[in-house]
Image (cartoon, rainbow, N blue to C red):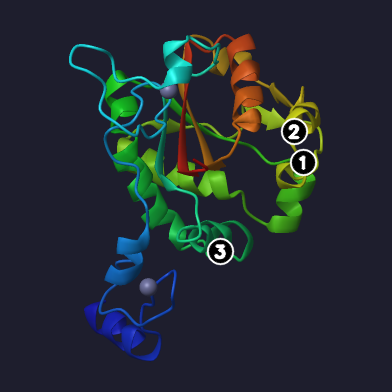
Amino acid sequence: MKIWEQFLNCILPPRCLKCGCILPDNRGLCPRCIQEINFITAPYCQKCGHPLETLPENGSKMLCGSCLSKKRTPFRLSRSAFRYDENSKHLVLAFKFHDKTDNASLLAKMMFVAGRDIFNAGADVIIPVPLHYTRLIKRRYNQSALLGHELSRLSGLKLNCRSLVKHRRTRPQVELRGRERLENVKGAFSVKKPEEIKGKRVILIDDVLTTGTTLKECAYALKRAGAKSVDTLTVARVV
Ligand SMILES: [Zn+2]
Ligand SMILES: [Zn+2]
């Protein structure tokens, strides 16, 4: 096996998933590209995971303005590994649209670290944001399900890809703004087997958190089916 691996590395050396330079081993990214990624580190809101500019005063809770004002949200906790910006965009888009599915394992490892508060708080099942079956046929894989699969392996939690379904086609959210985004995905998700969701603490998985409209619609469907709590864990977020 070792010799076979060495042979493969000679003819197909592992490359950096972002810039394509040759790497000595299969670690995924070269040191320069790793350094350029803006990982979300403390201080961040303990509830929604939004990065905070300053540390809160002694004794007050580490929460962002929105969570302090108790704005209604269907999520218990939300976390993301890094900021979605010019330095990280390529990594996410290559994974989503250009069959760079090898990235799943590296991205899931980053999510596993970013999601430690969620895993510590306790969860029962991992559920990826589903694609409509017509999109799944076109794209051949659901990027969120690949991440969910890796995270299930890392955390030992069960993966459920069949209960939450997208029963209606929608336009890509990137083409839309504000209210249109909301209307686009409203009522597009449902739970097929509520008995598998009832009383469960769910971790919803997606690639990028932008406005959170899609994740919210998924959370509402899960809550209607009796989910005890819903957390979100994404690779990146727009800050
Ligand atoms: Zn690189
Ligand atoms: Zn917050």
Residue 172 appears in the picture as rendered: yes
Left or right of 86 in this view: 14: left
User: In this figure, which residue is indicated by the disc labeled 3?
Assistant: 94
Left or right of 46 in this view: 91: right
Q: Quadrant of the N terminus?
A: bottom left
User: In this figure, which residue is indicated by the disc labeled 2?
Assistant: 181
Do tag 1 and tag 2 residues touch (Cβ < 8 Å)?
yes
What residue appears at the point 65 percent right and 18 percent down from the top-left corner? Answer: 221
In the picture as drawn, the residue positioned furthest to the left comes out as: 58
Between the residue at mark 3 and the residue at mark 1, the CA separation in whole angstroms equals 22 Å
Rendering coords of residue 69 (x, y %): 47, 10
Left or right of 106 in this view: 41: left
Rendering coords of residue 140 (x, y %): 67, 57
Q: Disc 3 or disc 2, which is closer to the eye?
A: 2
Q: Is residue 78 above or below residue 99?
A: above
Front in this rendered view, residue 159 or 4: 159
Front in this rendered view, residue 161 or 203: 203
Q: Amino acid at mark 3?
A: Ala
The 10 Å Cα crowd at callout 2, few under 14, some 14 to 19, many 20 or more, is many
Upstream in the sequence, badge 3 or badge 2? Answer: 3
Q: Which mark is residue 176?
A: 1
Q: Is label 1 in a helix, a strand or a loop?
A: loop
Do tag 3 and tag 1 residues touch (Cβ < 8 Å)?
no
Upstream in the sequence, badge 1 or badge 2? Answer: 1
Q: Amino acid at mark 2?
A: Arg
Q: Disc 3 or disc 1, which is closer to the eye?
A: 1
